[in-house]
Image (cartoon, rainbow, N blue to C red):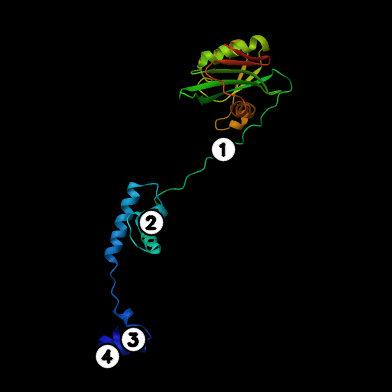
Amino acid sequence: MKAVGSRGVSIAQACRTFSISESCYRYECKLSDENAEISDWLEKLTDNRRTWGFGLCFLYLRNVKGFGWNHKRVYRIYCELELNLRINPKKRLKRDKPDVLAVPDIANHTWSMDFMADQLGDGRSIRSLDVLDDFNREGLGIEVDFSLPAERVVRSLNRIIEWRGKPLIIRVDNGPEYVSGKLMAWAKKASIHIQYIQPGKPQQNAYIERYNRTVRHEWPPLGDACITYRSTGPEHL
């Protein structure tokens, strides 16, 4: 203080004159070393845990390492190091409005098909191919096996067409079995249009998705056998 140094006034008198405490006058900053330690810890944590923000870093220092640093102090150093700016915000993709789900006017106009996955009691994985008539939500076929490649899909569809007749359109998602050349060649030969839904728009295949839920939650387990369901009842192959 200038009054103490130049005029020889005692510290106590100067502090009373200017209404400050003696402890405030005698205070010496001792936080530089701790601030450097906080900086080192924050830089180390953000380098090793790139997805951690300030909250996780502070909780780690407080609860795991046992440091008693005040969160405001740690956050101030966190911002001075510009660690709050290191993660760019995610850009949201602008998606087109999905097409309206078409409702056929007659039976056997549009079918939907989709796969379901499940697991047996012994741990083996199984798959089922479900086929549905969109007009009246009639289940046309369920093919169950450990593997259902494109050849099996074509064989199942041919079996249904034998007693049901062929549709004009079959609506599917973009799974590998549906985009294979064998299925496309079969559909072209049979004059059937394969209609793919937009990627990331399962609501465009809502009929078969709802049917899958019914099969999964309301039907008894299908077991190990491959079953084809028809309107006349299940037939074990």
Q: Could you tell me residue 196's position as x and y percent?
A: 58, 24
Q: Indicate the position of residue 149 as horizontal and vertical percent values.
A: 50, 16
Disc 3 element: helix
Sequence-earlier tag: 3 or 2: 3
Q: Residues within 10 Å of mark 4 (few under 14, many from 20)?
A: few
187 lies above or below 201: above
Task: Tell me the CA gap for discs 1 and 4.
Answer: 76 Å
Considering only order in the chain, which callout, 1 or 2, is on the residue closer to the N terminus? 2
Q: Name the residue under label 2.
A: 58
Amino acid carrying mark 2 in the image: Phe
Q: Distance between the residues labelled 2 and 1?
A: 37 Å
Q: In this view, does 39 lie above or below 121?
A: below
- Three-letter code for the amino acid on which mark 3 is drawn: Cys
Instruction: Identify the mark nearer the N-term, 2 or 4.
Output: 4
Q: Name the residue under label 3.
A: 15
Q: In the orientation shown, which residue stands out farthest toward the right?
A: 105
Q: Which of marks 2 and 4 is in front?
A: 2
Q: How far apart are marks 3 and 2 (CA)?
A: 38 Å
For label 4, the residue is 7
Q: In this view, does 10 lie to the left or right of 147?
A: left
Q: Height in image: 223 above or below 28? A: above
In-front residue for pair 120/59: 120
- For label 4, the SS is helix
Q: Which callout, 2 or 1, points to the residue nearer the camera?
A: 2
| SS class, disc 2 | helix
* Residue mark closest to the camera, 3 vs 2: 2
Residue 222, image quadrant: top right
* Discs 3, 1 touching: Cβ within 8 Å: no
- Which residue does the numbered mark 1 point to in the structure image? 95
Locate residue 219 relative to residue 124 in the image: left or right. right
Amino acid at pointer 4: Arg
